[in-house]
Image: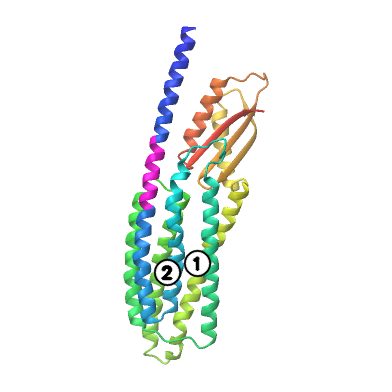
Amino acid sequence: MKTDNSTKKKDSVKKERREKKERREKKEKLTIEKRILQLSFLGSVLFIVAEGVMAWFTHSHSLWTDCLFDAADLVMIGPFLVLVPLLYKPVTEKHPYGYAQVESLFLLVKYSVLLALTCNLMVENIKLLLHGGHEVDAGSIAIFELLVCLGCAGMYLLLGHYSKKYESTTIKAELYMWKLDVISSMGVAVAFAVQMILFTTRFRFLTPYIDPAVAVIMALLLIKEPVKEIFQSIKNLILFAPEEDVLNQIRGIVDKHMNDYPYEVTFLDVIQTGRKLWVEVYIGNKTDVIHISILHRVRDEIKQELKYKYDQVYIEIIPD
């Protein structure tokens, strides 16, 4: 009896330590995520104001395209700063999936707005191309975009430094936006440098088409990510199973740990929504004897391995 009580006490102490560690890790993740989003927000404000002023000054449609796309993304960061703390609240009976689906819904709205805006900008610039384009100050735009490219690269490296400690779905989206800004700014700078060269050649007649053509190309490049994320967010909201490679990876980890115990996996139910992952492992054995302590042990082992691959993981071992 004393041995049983001692074992229970040790298990209780281990559980308490594990819960304290998880709470500490969640607090650290929340701090890092809020810091990254705040830095991204401030950086976006500075670049959007600069792009807006330059677009008004030069009447460049490619600058307006970039400016409006960034502005739409910025509008979404503000509310998300309020939402982030909710994503770290524990699962309850009232909210069995926590607020993970709110994140999926938020991302769906965000990328839908970006997609609609991008399509509208692309149509407007195609119309401008068909009507002969227009002239802009290529030299000023090329120098400005080069400076923007350097600034965005600095911000991307800074956010990337913080994200080494922790990277969520939202942080990945922000890093992608800054990376895209670096590439698009460099592309625009090169395009207008080419326009300056064309202006001194017999191909001068092409120069009015450079600005709207660059805007259309930017819009085409920007469309891919919103479309991809919209479909992913819809899958998360409907609670579809994740991609096949994710399922195979989780199944491999579960099977590896189950090999050490007298149970076999009869069914694996995996749900991924937002940054959270739920894994229900249904098990059986020939003797129909289930040891609760063993189930807890194998659950903790699987969770420990999965937590390094996925953000917030919930594991349940269920006798079939």
**Type of residue at label 1?**
Leu
Q: Which stretch appears magenta?
A: 24-36
Q: Position of residue 269 (x, y in %)?
A: 62, 38
Give the position of the C terminus as an image quadrant: top right
Say above or below: 281 vs 112: above
Report the disc number at residue 222.
1
Say above or below: 269 vs 274: above
Q: Residues within 10 Å of mark 1 (few under 14, many from 20)?
A: many
Q: Secondary structure at mark 2?
A: helix
Residue 27 in view here: yes
Q: Residue furthest bottom?
A: 202
Classify residue 158 as left or right of residue 5: left
Judge whether residue 27 is colored magenta. yes
Q: Position of residue 169 (x, y in %)?
A: 48, 50
- Along the polypeptide, which appears first: circle 2 or circle 1? 2
Say above or below: 60 vs 20: below
Classify residue 280 as left or right of residue 146: right
| Residue at the image position 41 percent from the left and 67 percent from the top | 183
Is the residue under label 1 in contact with that under label 2 (CB below 8 Å)?
yes
Distance between mark 2 and mark 1 Cα atoms:
9 Å
**Type of residue at label 2?**
Ser
What is the magenta segment's predominant secondary structure?
A: helix
Q: Position of residue 101 (x, y in %)?
A: 55, 47
Residue 193 in view here: no
Report the disc number at residue 184.
2
